Amino acid sequence: MLARMEGCWRATGEVVVFLDSHIEATQGWLEPLLARIRDDPRRVVVPSIDSINFDTFDFEGGSGLGVLGFTWTLGQKPEAVRTDQEEPLKSPIMAGGLFAADR
């Protein structure tokens, strides 16, 4: 966390984007995030999280995490991913390894 904060403090751009080392970004992933932040700089935005096949390492778009929520025991519970969803969704929690925010 300290390394991320140091990077944020030293950043000179308008937006900071954090991606863990295991994240693979696909073409066109950044533009929607920047548009959401431009619309409301108070937002912290997270891209949709797709997955890869464990056996073949093939990309499986639309099969990853969607909106995250909590179970009654406060465990993390992913909601179903809708591949036709175009509007952003609010989420009570987010994955900590990939997000963007106004600096």
Image (spheres, rainbow, N blue to C red):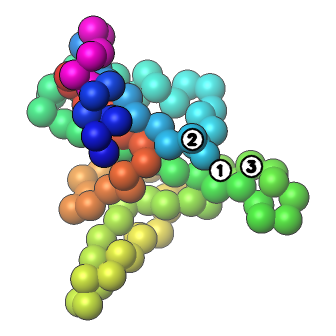
Q: Are marks 2 and 3 in contact (CB under 8 Å)?
A: no
Q: Earlier in the sequence, mark 2 or mark 3?
A: 2
Is residue 6 placed above or below 97 in the rendered structure? above
Badge 3 is on which residue? 59
Which residue is at the front of the view, 59 or 76? 76
Across and down, in percent, residue 44 comes to 24, 39
Q: Is residue 39 left or right of residue 19?
A: left
Which mark is on residue 26? none
Indicate the quadrant containing the C terminus: top left, top right, bottom left or bottom right: top left
Across and down, in percent, residue 94 comes to 32, 56
Badge 2 is on which residue? 21
Say what secondary structure mark 1 lies in.
Answer: strand
Across and down, in percent, residue 24 comes to 63, 39
Which mark is on residue 61? 1
Q: Which residues are magenta?
A: 8-13
Residue 11 among magenta residues: yes
Q: Report the amino acid beneath label 1.
A: Gly
Q: Report the amino acid beneath label 2.
A: Ser
Which residue is at the front of the view, 10 or 98? 10
Foreground: disc 2 or disc 3: 2
Which residue does the image show at 49% across and 61% down from the upper left?
Answer: 65
Q: Are marks 1 and 2 in contact (CB under 8 Å)?
A: no
Across and down, in percent, residue 60 comes to 71, 54
